[in-house]
Image (cartoon, rainbow, N blue to C red):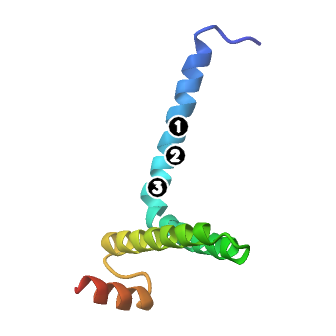
């Protein structure tokens, strides 16, 4: 079975829009958790890079992880109305002076 000439671009456009809608929904629904997870993963990769002598990568990934984890924690607290953990509550309440 062959598709008409105009069907391939239309199918491609529908597929791309569907993927973008799915990614937008995932970011909206799981964004804070995924951002915090990305921070933990960056720390793990930073440790691995540092243990192999890549100290510049270690520093860059550790900073990226701290930013990702912090942003995800603040996003979580803003969305849910409470901190995700007692450690986060103590750290960010003192840091933000709330």
* SS for dot 3: helix
Residue 81 lies, in percent from the top left, at: 31, 77
Q: Secondary structure at mark 2?
A: helix
Check the picture and name the quadrant holding the N terminus.
top right
Query: Residue lying furthest right in this view?
Result: 1
Task: From the top left corner, tell me how far across and down residue 58 is, in percent.
Answer: 60, 71
Q: Residue furthest left?
A: 98
Sequence-first tag of 1 and 3: 1
Asked if 61 appears above or below 23 in the picture, the reply is: below
Marks 1,3: beta carbons within 8 A:
no
Q: Position of residue 24 (x, y in %)?
A: 45, 48
Q: Quarter-wise, where is residue 11 in the image?
A: top right
Q: Are marks 2 and 1 in contact (CB under 8 Å)?
A: yes
Per the rendering, the mark at residue 18 is 1
**Residue farthest top in this picture:** 5
10 vs 33, nearest the viewer: 33
- Identify the disc placed on residue 22: 2
Q: Which residue in the protein does label 3 denote? A: 27
Q: Quadrant of the C terminus?
A: bottom left
């Amino acid at each position: 079975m062959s598709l008409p000439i105009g069907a391939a671009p239309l199918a491609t456009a529908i597929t791309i829009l569907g993927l973008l809608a799915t990614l937008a929904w995932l970011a909206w629904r799981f964004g804070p958790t995924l951002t915090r997870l990305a921070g933990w993963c960056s720390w793990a990769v930073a440790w691995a890079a540092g243990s192999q002598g890549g100290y510049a990568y270690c520093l860059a990934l550790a900073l990226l992880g701290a930013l990702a984890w912090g942003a995800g924690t603040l996003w979580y607290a803003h969305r849910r109305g409470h901190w995700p953990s007692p450690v986060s509550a103590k750290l960010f309440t003192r840091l933000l002076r709330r």
